Amino acid sequence: METITSIKPLLAVLVSLVAVIPIVASGSKPNLREGWTFLAGFVKFGLVVSMVPLVLGGTIIEYTLAEPLPGLAIQFRVDAMGMLFALVSSSLWIITSAYSIGYMRGLSEHSQTRYFSFFAIALSATIGVAFSANLFTMYLFYEMLSLATYPLVTHHQDDEARISGRKYLTYILGTSIGLVLPAMLIIYSLTGTLDFAAQGILPIGLSKSTVAVLLLMCVFGFAKAGIMPFHGWLPAAMVAPTPVSALLHAVAVVKVGVFSIFRVITGIFGTNLLLSLNLGTVLCYIAAFTILTASLIALSQDGLKRRLAFSTIGQLSYIILGASLLSPKGQTGGLMHIAMHAFGKITLFMCAGAIFVATGKKYISEMVGIGKRMPVTMTAFLIGSLSVIGLPPTGGFISKWFLVLGTLEADQITMLVVLLGSSLLNAAYFLPVVYRAFFCTPEESMFEDKVQEAPLWCIVPLVITAIVSVGLFFFPQPFFNLASMAVQTITGG
Amino acid sequence: MSFAEQAPVLLVIIPLLSALLVNMVGLINRRYCLPVAVTGILGSLTASVITLIRVMENGVISYRLGGWPPPFGIEYVIDHLNGLVLVTISFVSLLAVIFSKESIKKELPEKIPQFYTLFVLLVTGLLGMTVTGDAFNLYVLLEISALTGYALIAMGDNRALVASFNYIILGTIGASFYLLGVGHLYIMTGSLNMGDLLTILPRLYTLNVVFIALLLILTGTWIKMAFFPMHGWLPNAYTYAPSAAGCLVAPLVTKVSVYIMIRIMLSVFSPLYVYNIAGLSETIVWMAVIAILSGSILALAQTDFKKMLTYLIVAEVGYMVGGAWLASSAGLTGAILHIVNDALMTLCLFIFAGIVIYKRGGHQLQDLAGLYKKMPVTMAAFTVGALSMIGVPPTAGFFSKWYLILGAIDAGRYHFMAALLFSSLVNAILFFRVIEIAYFEPKIDHHGGETENIVVDEAPLSMLVPLIIVALSLIVIGLYSGDIVTNIIQHSVPQGL
Amino acid sequence: MPSIISDYNYWIYILLMMIGLYAMLAKNNLVKKVIGMSIFQTAIIIFYVSISAKEHATIPIIAHHGAAEAAIDVAHYANPLPHVLMLTAIVVSVGTLGVALALCLGIYRRYNSLEEDEIQEQLQ
């Protein structure tokens, strides 16, 4: 495996950061301002894509930015796992930016310049996490993301936003400073380094309880992954404008959380160490608990965004489950679910936002018969639901398939039951929404019969992601290739 | 007889003479006071930087006043530790004096010459304390800076007089304890020169007198640095002082007292005695833990923004004392790095407080409403300072916390680590409370279609520029922490800790 | 070590220090606190001066009349160094006294009282 040095990772991170300056400068000319966002998005995506062939060919791209502490550098390393995540985030940023335009203008939201600026910074941080070479760099960008998303979550600046903002920070900053920071320091004092390595960096001979404590500190510390009981910020953060919810809480923020946990499990602790100490099972049960509980709570939610939020909490733990199975197929499934879930969930969130822009409705009970008025949106919603449930012909089926195979490989039949059971639950809380939207009598319907969709800027993005969700079933590469490659490094290296 | 060779003493003499000049010039026209003060401090900044560079190239510098050899004469000794602190003091003083331009015009228009005289004298005292290698000379300069400090603080608004009076009582007790401790050392060794004491004392380590001397000096410096529970003078004194005085006193006086403690620990009593023989580490680290917790909790209870900051200073002092007494090299490195970082962070926050007072007239938490819209640049700089206090990378505060926690883990003192983490979380609560008020209030219903017409009304340039420089330096120093540690601090931390 | 007269000087200075400390912390009147501070500092000055005394020693001034240029026996002269240090300390303590009294004056002008409890009341 060859390693080359290139400034591309740093550029990919910096593009959106630098773009903030022209965005702020052109604040009074909305079209120009949005143009900068798109430009940055395409450049970022382009940079990321340009590195894909190298990574698929087995090369690793490295770049060291600075070394604030002796032995601890802010360093980027682009490998298969990071590339997968970066591809997802950078492509979806472009889509969400388009969607944001439709949403924010449709509702005449205030402070749009601030919104787009912090969105750009948040994406910078996300790519930074994706390309981090060591735990310190990842922590730095993780915190940067927490802070950059605060103005986005509290965008409406009313009392509700203030309380949600507090909840957001309490859960996310509280766990990262209270759990991740000490864990990181203890690991550093034990090993002298924080670089991610193929088989983990912890020395042999550590007691099981030490490793277990550190592992739990890390897993619960990255509260962005929404593992219970530190999931409370996710539903609270739904007060944000829907594009924020869409990208950040279905794709970037939460995926940063699970990605970090995935990295720590594989790169700091190492699959072999965890297998030998039998700690994978503990994690599986923690993940399973979240999956089932979240799915059950989702059933009881009438607010569409809240239902989607709890669905996300459950789906995130699928990814953690994949990592915790400590088996190649399971981990492949987990990594692919990062991508599949992202496309599926963002479709669902964008549909929710489109419904709000077009009709002002937020509650599922009010959405009877809406399929007649917004057929395109609801069809996309259907496709997104199928992907999240994990039915063919959507991409979600592929990742769930691998997860199921992973449970068999790891001899965790209980987890197999959990997976199948939660899929049923997913169907139970999604399909009725679609059913009542399309198939109901005209008396029950709350809407007139004419088609009145959301603005074009909202519809086109969600159609695109819905199509991609289907397309990923037929063409799961490059995510499949990247995931397999990553897993190969973890197990073979 | 080059400037570089005489720099060690020039960095004290230049401000001393400038103080005199400021006063004389003030009799003619008070508009010349500020430029003279700035020139004086700029002179000592140049001298400090030159001295630090020389120390980094050549090693420890020894300057004998009047050419008299120790122990007969007073010796100035500059090594990496005080070289770094000297540069910090002059840099912070320079930024504070530039800030003071508009602030003093508004708060103390009739007392400008007096203010600047005292200001520059205080800087002289601080620099002198740091550069000297003689224990008694340190006392003299300690009192010079203390007296000027008392007077500067007393110039503030109505509560300042009483606050300054309490300060003078407690501060004198502190300085006197220090003097007493030095006296005990003198009786036993016959010398006042720090280097001399280092060589003579080891024979006497088993004697009680040496231990008593250490305790007396420690108590004296603890009172001066407001180490809990001897912190009672600090909140009122720093809250009610004039803004510009606060910007000089708050970042520096307590930190220089911490430096004195470290200097006495390492260069007079030696690490061997302090960590292995005296047996005080455990107790002092526990005291530091209590200091951190009390400072943080008391800060939570405040509705006055400036007072909140002063309680945070009490907590930060706990960081440094605990770090120094951990008996681990990472801990000591963290404590020394934190001297620099905390000086900068405190300066950032106090300049911000000064700007708020200048614009809003008060320093209660409610006076901060709506500042993000009105003063975006100021708030951005404040946010950097707040993040540094919380300990978010890549600001400087994160890196000194890193070393301190690492030191706590190395020394097995997990309660200190817990206190540091607790303090970070409390700081997060405190500063986000401020950020919330500045961001969310006054409440406007955005969905009601009201548009806000906020006119951006930034602070005057002479206040804004130092603030921006400090905020930037917090990030730059954060990123270069490793270099500072390897090139400067590492040389002062004794091996084998 | 030069011979010391006896240990009672230590007890005296401790007693004086405690009186000063008590006055500073427990007395209500500000001027009494200042006096206490003065006593405290004086106690330390006395301590230093006392340690410079030696048995049968005289003041450390050398007479330069003709034949007295002979060798100087150190044990005949009291230690001048603490005296000199204490001159500095006395100056410092006078300065401190001055500042403290100036503060008292300012406080009196502002609050019309020098009693701590009355001032505290006015501050509330």
Image: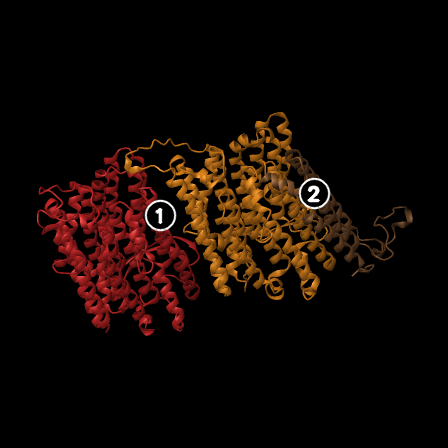
Please state, as top left, top right, bottom left or bottom right, where the C terminus of chain A lies in the image: bottom left
Residue B188 image position (x, y, % from top left):
73, 60
Which chain is brown in the picture? C
Identify the residue at horizontal 60%, vertical 25% (top origin).
Answer: B29
Which chain is red in the picture? A
- Disc 1: which chain? A
Residue B223 image position (x, y, % from top left):
62, 51
Label 1: few (<14), some (14–19) or many (≥20) C-alpha neighbours in 10 Å = some
Which chain is orange in the picture? B
Work out whether A308 lies above or below B114. below
**Tag 2 residue:** C29
Work out whether B436 lies above or below A433. above
Q: Nearer the viewer, residue B113 or B480?
A: B113
Numbered circles on residues, count: 2
Q: Nearer the viewer, residue B349 or A482?
A: B349
**Tag 1 residue:** A163
Identify the residue at horizontal 54%, vertical 57% (top origin).
Answer: B290
The CA distance from mark 2 to mark 1 is 50 Å
Please state, as top left, top right, bottom left or bottom right, where the N terminus of chain A lies in the image: bottom left
Q: Nearer the viewer, residue B87 or B225?
A: B225
Is residue B89 among the parts visible in the rendering?
A: no
